[in-house]
C-alpha cells in the first residue's frame, strides 16, 4: 500500500488539547489520553474519526464521559481505530497498554539501560496511544508521568514542568505543560535514573532559560562540549536569523540505544550518546564536530520544524533541508568556512550523488512511499540543504533573511508545504522562483559540461554551458534546472580578472553569479584580449557534476584559484583523473605523476598557513568516490591504484612528511579549536603516508599509539596499524579493547576499525566480531559500527569477489529485520548498487537481495528497499 503525495486530504477532525497520563512500567505501561476534538471546517464533513495505532492493547474508550460500546468503533486490520458518528465537538478518552521493554524497534516508548525514552518521528506516537498521527494535527499537550521514585527519579516531557509530587501509593509524578501547539511526532517522554548537567542562557529579550543535559551516572563529566555547542547555537540563531528560544527550559536527554543521531522534540531533545558525550581521551576531533553539528541541528529545528512544521511527510525536506543548511552555516561561522564547505560537499558526494544514481533515486520531495522512515535520506537532507543554499546564494544574505522572516512570520504555528516555503522566500526576498520548484520535483544529479571560444579581434570570449540529467526510476524525461554558477576568470598568470558580460556597462571584480536556465546557454564576456581560465562553481554553488576539465587546467586551478573550494576540488579531480587512467591502463607499478608530487610538495610547504585545509587537500579522493566516477566499478583495481599512489607519494615525499610530522608534535594541553585539530589532522595525514612508505612508519604509528593522550591521535595510529599484518596490530587492538571495554562509544570505534581494514581477511574478521560477546544486534550504534562500517565503508572488502561480504550483510539484515526494521532497512543500501558492479558481483548481490525479499514476515521498510533495488 503506497502513500502518494497527491492523495493528501485534510484531517476530518482537529485536536485542540491532549492530556496524557503515563503509569510507567517496563512490561505494562498504561497510557491514558484525553483528546478534545473538533470537526475540521476544512475537512470532509461526514468522514469518521480515524486514529492511528500500532502494537497497542486497547483497554477502554469513553466519549464525553461515557464508556463506548464495541458497536461504536472498529479496529481495522492496519491497526487504526475508526469512530463514526461523533459529535462535531467532543472529548474522547482512550486507555491503552504498551510494553516498553519488549519494544526492540526503538520507535514509540522503549527502555534503554533501565530508563524510558520515546522516539515518535515519523510515526512512533501511534505506538503509544491511538491518535491522528500526522503532522498537520497540531495540539497543546499536558503530560503527567507517574513512576516508581527509586527506579525513575527523573520524569521529563515537553514544555515547562508545572507540578510534581508523591501519590498516596508512594509513586511520584511530574506534570509538564507545553504551551505551543505541536504535531504528535514532537512528543517526548524521558524517565529514569539520570543526572543533569546544568547551565543557563538568557535570550536577547531577557528570557532566562534553564538548560540541562541528562545522562547516566558517570557521563556527567563528558557534557561540556555539548553544553557549549548548545549555547553557541542559541546565540547564533538570535544573531543570524533573529530567532529566540520560546520556553523556560531546554532539556537534552542522552540515550545509547537510538535509531538515528538525535531528535528535536519540543523542549526535550533526545540524543544518541554519540552526539553528546566527549572527553579528549574518548572522542576524536571528528566526534567533537559531530556533536556541535547535531546539537545545533536539533536546536535550530525549534523554529524550522517545530514552530513551523510539515503538512505531511512528503514535505520532510521543508524542515530537514532547511535545518541542515542552517547547521552548515553555523558550522562555517564557528570555524573555517572553507574547510566546512569542503567537508559538507564531500558528504554530499559520498552519500547523495550515489543515491541519485541508484535504484532508490527520488526527488527531494518524493511522490510516493511505502514506509516514510525510508525517506530520511541524503537526498531529503543534504540535497535539500543544497537547494536552500542555492536560494541563499542567489538572493544574498540580506534578501534571504527577509525571505526567512516572511516564512516564519507568515507560517508560525502552521503545518505547511514546500510551496509555502518557496513562496515566502520569493515574496520576502523579491525574486521569482517559479522555475526553481523543479529542484524539488526532479531526481538525479545534473551533469554540466562547458566549451569556450575566443575572438582575439573583438576581445570577446564565449562560455557555453550545457546541462543534462540522466533518467531515474519513474522519471524518464528530465527538464533543465535553474543552476546558479558562482564563477570568476583568471588570467594566464593566475590573477583574478574583472568580468564584464555583453550588455553590462561596467566590469565587476571577483566572483559573480551566472544563472543557467536552459539545456544550453552562451555567456559572452567582453574585454578579454587573451582567453581566460574560468573558475566555475565556486564554493560549490550548485549540487551538480562538472566534468570534462582538462588535467592541465585542473592543475592550474588547484594552484592559482582564489576560491579555496575550487582549489581543493580541482586537486581532487586531478587525482581522480590520474587514478582512473591508472585503472584503465592497469599500470600498477608506475611512479606517481610529477604534477601530483609537485602539488603535494607545495601543499606541505605552505601547510602552516591553514593546516586544516592542507590536510583536506593532501588526502586522495576516497575509493568510493573514484568508484562513483566509473561505469563499471572495479573495487580491487581502485584499491590497488589508490594504495600504489599513496605509497609512491609517501616515498617520494617521505622527508617532507616526516619533517611536517615532527614539527606538528603537540606537547601542550589538548585544545579543540580549528587550528589545533587542523594540526592533528595534518600530522595524522603525514603519518598515514609515512606508514605506507616503509617499515619505520609502522614504528612511528606504534609510538604514537602508545604515547597518545587524546583519541584523535590514538585512533589515527590504530587505523594505520589495523591495516597491517603485524604483531603491533594485534597488540594495539588488544590493548585498546582492554582499556576501553567499559565505554560503549569507544568500543564502537574498536569494531569499526577492524571492519574497515583493507586486509583481505577482513570479511572473516567481521563474521568473528559479529559473534564477539561485546557485539549486540539490538544496539544500533554497535550494528552501525560493525556491519554499517564494513558494508558502506570498506568497498574493497565488502565487494570481495566470493560474495562473502554480500552474504554477511544479507544475513545480518534478515536477523535484524524482525527486531528493528528501521536499522535493517537502512543497512541494506550497499546491496542496491548492484548495477554498478561487474556481472558476476551484480548477480551475487541480486541473489542476496532476493534471499532477503523471500524472508517471511519482512518489515514494510526492508521490503520497500529490497524490492525497489531489484526492480
Ligand atoms: N528529525 C530527526 C533529525 O534531525 C531525525 C528523525 C529521523 N527519524 C526517522 N524515523 N528516521 O534530524
Ligand atoms: Zn533534522
Image: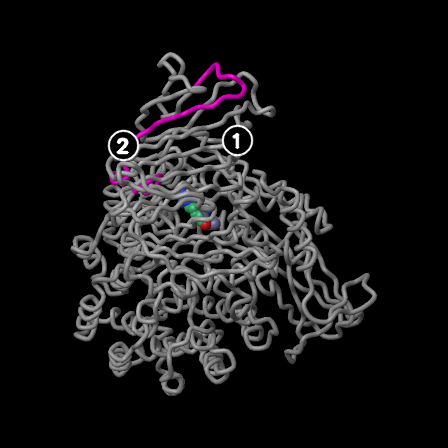
Tell me the residue at 40%/74% (across/down).
681
Spot occupied by residue 361 in the image (x, y as percentages of width and height): 47, 44
Membership of 95 in magenta stretch: yes
Determine whether the beta carbon of the residue marked 1 sits less than 8 angstroms from the nearest atom of ligand 1. no
Spot occupied by residue 527 in the image (x, y as percentages of width and height): 78, 71
Tell me the residue at 50%/36% (across/down).
140
Rendered-image quadrant of the N terminus: top left
On the picture, is 298 further left or further right than 750?
Answer: right
Which residue, as the protein is rendered here, is positioned at the far right?
A: 505
On the picture, is 781 further left or further right than 571?
Answer: left
Q: Is residue 522 visible?
A: yes
Density class for disc 1 (Cα within 10 Å; few <14, some 14-19, many ≥20) is some
Which residue, as the protein is rendered here, is positioned at the far front?
A: 168
Tag shown at residue 91? none
Tell me the residue at 38%/21% (across/down).
61
Tag shown at residue 16? 1
Is the residue 685 above or below the residue 210 in the image? below
Q: CA distance from mark 1 to mark 2?
A: 38 Å
Query: Mark 2 falls on what kind of element?
Result: loop
Density class for disc 2 (Cα within 10 Å; few <14, some 14-19, many ≥20) is few
Rendered-image quadrant of the C terminus: top left
The residue that label 2 is drawn on is 857
Q: What is the span of residues highlighted in magenta in the rendered image?
A: 83-110
Amino acid at each position: 500500500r503506497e502513500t502518494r503525495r497527491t492523495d493528501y486530504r485534510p484531517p476530518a477532525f482537529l485536536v485542540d488539547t491532549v492530556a496524557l497520563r503515563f503509569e510507567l512500567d517496563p512490561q505494562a505501561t498504561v497510557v491514558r489520553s484525553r483528546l478534545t476534538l473538533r470537526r475540521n471546517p476544512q475537512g470532509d464533513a461526514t468522514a469518521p474519526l480515524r486514529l492511528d495505532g500500532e502494537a497497542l492493547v486497547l483497554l477502554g474508550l469513553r466519549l464525553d464521559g461515557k464508556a463506548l460500546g464495541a458497536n461504536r468503533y472498529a479496529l481495522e486490520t492496519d491497526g487504526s481505530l475508526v469512530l463514526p458518528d461523533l459529535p462535531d465537538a467532543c472529548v474522547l478518552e482512550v486507555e491503552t497498554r504498551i510494553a516498553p521493554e519488549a519494544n526492540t524497534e526503538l520507535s514509540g516508548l522503549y527502555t534503554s539501560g533501565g530508563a524510558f525514552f520515546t522516539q515518535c518521528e515519523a510515526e512512533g506516537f501511534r505506538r503509544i496511544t491511538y491518535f491522528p498521527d500526522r503532522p498537520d494535527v497540531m495540539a497543546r499537550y499536558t503530560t503527567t508521568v507517574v513512576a516508581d521514585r527509586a527506579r525513575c527519579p527523573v520524569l521529563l516531557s515537553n514544555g515547562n514542568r508545572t507540578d510534581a509530587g508523591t501519590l498516596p501509593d508512594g509513586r511520584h509524578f511530574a506534570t509538564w505543560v507545553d504551551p505551543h501547539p505541536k504535531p504528535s511526532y514532537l512528543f517526548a517522554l524521558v524517565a529514569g535514573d539520570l543526572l543533569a548537567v546544568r547551565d543557563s542562557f538568557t535570550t536577547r529579550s531577557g528570557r532566562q532559560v534553564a538548560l540541562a543535559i541528562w545522562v547516566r551516572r558517570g557521563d556527567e563529566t563528558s557534557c561540556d562540549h555539548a553544553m557549549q555547542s548548545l549555547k553557541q547555537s542559541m546565540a547564533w540563531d538570535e544573531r543570524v536569523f533573529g530567532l529566540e528560544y520560546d520556553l523556560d527550559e531546554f532539556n537534552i536527554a542522552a540515550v545509547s540505544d537510538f535509531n538515528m543521531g538525535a531528535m528535536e522534540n519540543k523542549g526535550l531533545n533526545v540524543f544518541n550518546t554519540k552526539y553528546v558525550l566527549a572527553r579528549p581521551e574518548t572522542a576524536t576531533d571528528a566526534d567533537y564536530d559531530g556533536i556541535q553539528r547535531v546539537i545545533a541541528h536539533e536546536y535550530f529545528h525549534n523554529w524550522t520544524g517545530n514552530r513551523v512544521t510539515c503538512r505531511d511527510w512528503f514535505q520532510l525536506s521543508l524542515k530537514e533541508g532547511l535545518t541542515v543548511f542552517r547547521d552548515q552555516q553555523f558550522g562555517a561561522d564557528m570555524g573555517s568556512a572553507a574547510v566546512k564547505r569542503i567537508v559538507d560537499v564531500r558528504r554530499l558526494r559520498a552519500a547523495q550523488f550515489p543515491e541519485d544514481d541508484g535504484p532508490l533515486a527520488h526527488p527531494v520531495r518524493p511522490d510516493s512511499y511505502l514506509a516514510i522512515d525510508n525517506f530520511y535520506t541524503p537526498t531529503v537532507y543534504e540535497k535539500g540543504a543544497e537547494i536552500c543554499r542555492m536560494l541563499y546564494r542567489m538572493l544574498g544574505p540580506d534578501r534571504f533573511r527577509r525571505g526567512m522572516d516572511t516564512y516564519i512570520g507568515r507560517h508560525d504555528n502552521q503545518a505547511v508545504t514546500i510551496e509555502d516555503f518557496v513562496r515566502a522566500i520569493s515574496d520576502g526576498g523579491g525574486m521569482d522562483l517559479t522555475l526553481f520548484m523543479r529542484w524539488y520535483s526532479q531526481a538525479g544529479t545534473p551533469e554540466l559540461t562547458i566549451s569556450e571560444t575566443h575572438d582575439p579581434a573583438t576581445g570577446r570570449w564565449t562560455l557555453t554551458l550545457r546541462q543534462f540529467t540522466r533518467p531515474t526510476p519513474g522519471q524518464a524525461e528530465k527538464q533543465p534546472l535553474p543552476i546558479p554558477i558562482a564563477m570568476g576568470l583568471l588570467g594566464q598568470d593566475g590573477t583574478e580578472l574583472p568580468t564584464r558580460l555583453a550588455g553590462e556597462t561596467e566590469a565587476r571584480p571577483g566572483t559573480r553569479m551566472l544563472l543557467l536556465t536552459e539545456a544550453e546557454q552562451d555567456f559572452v564576456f567582453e574585454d578579454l584580449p587573451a582567453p581566460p581560465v574560468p573558475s566555475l562553481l565556486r564554493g560549490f554553488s550548485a549540487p551538480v557534476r562538472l566534468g570534462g576539465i582538462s588535467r592541465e587546467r585542473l592543475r592550474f586551478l588547484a594552484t592559482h584559484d582564489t576560491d579555496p573550494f575550487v582549489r581543493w576540488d580541482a586537486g581532487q579531480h586531478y587525482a581522480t583523473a590520474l587514478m582512473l587512467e591508472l585503472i584503465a591502463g592497469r599500470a600498477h607499478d608506475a611512479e606517481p605523476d610529477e604534477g601530483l608530487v609537485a602539488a603535494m610538495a607545495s601543499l606541505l610547504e605552505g601547510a602552516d598557513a591553514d593546516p586544516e585545509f592542507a590536510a583536506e587537500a593532501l588526502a586522495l579522493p576516497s575509493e568510493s568516490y573514484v568508484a562513483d566516477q566509473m561505469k563499471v566499478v572495479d573495487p580491487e583495481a581502485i584499491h590497488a591504484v589508490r594504495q600504489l599512489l599513496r605509497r609512491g607519494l609517501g616515498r617520494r615525499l617521505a622527508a617532507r612528511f616526516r619533517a611536517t610530522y615532527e614539527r606538528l608534535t603537540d606537547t601542550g594541553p589538548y585544545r579543540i579549536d580549528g587550528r589545533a585539530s587542523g594540526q592533528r589532522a595534518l600530522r595524522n595525514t603525514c603519518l598515514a603516508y609515512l606508514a605506507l612508505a616503509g617499515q619505520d612508519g609502522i614504528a612511528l604509528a606504534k609510538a604514537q599509539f602508545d604515547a597518545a593522550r587524546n583519541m584523535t591521535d590514538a585512533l589515527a595510529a590504530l587505523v594505520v596499524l589495523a591495516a597491517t599484518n603485524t604483531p603491533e596490530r594485534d597488540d594495539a587492538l588488544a590493548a585498546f579493547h582492554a582499556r576501553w571495554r567499559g565505554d560503549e562509544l569507544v568500543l564502537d570505534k574498536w569494531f569499526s576499525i577492524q571492519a574497515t581494514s583493507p586486509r583481505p581477511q577482513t570479511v572473516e574478521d567481521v563474521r568473528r566480531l559479529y559473534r564477539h560477546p561485546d557485539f549486540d544486534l539490538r544496539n544500533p550504534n554497535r550494528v552501525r559500527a560493525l556491519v554499517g562500517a564494513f558494508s558502506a565503508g570498506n568497498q574493497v572488502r565488502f565487494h570481495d569477489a566470493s560474495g562473502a561480504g554480500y552474504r554477511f550483510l544479507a544475513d545480518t539484515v534478515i536477523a535484524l529485520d524482525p527486531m528493528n526494521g528501521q536499522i535493517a532497512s537502512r543497512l541494506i543500501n550497499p546491496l542496491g548498487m548492484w548495477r554498478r558492479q561487474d556481472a558476476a558481483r551484480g548477480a551475487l548481490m541480486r541473489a542476496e537481495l532476493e534471499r532477503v525479499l523471500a524472508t517471511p514476515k519482512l518489515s514494510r521498510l526492508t521490503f520497500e528497499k529490497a524490492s525497489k533495488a531489484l526492480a
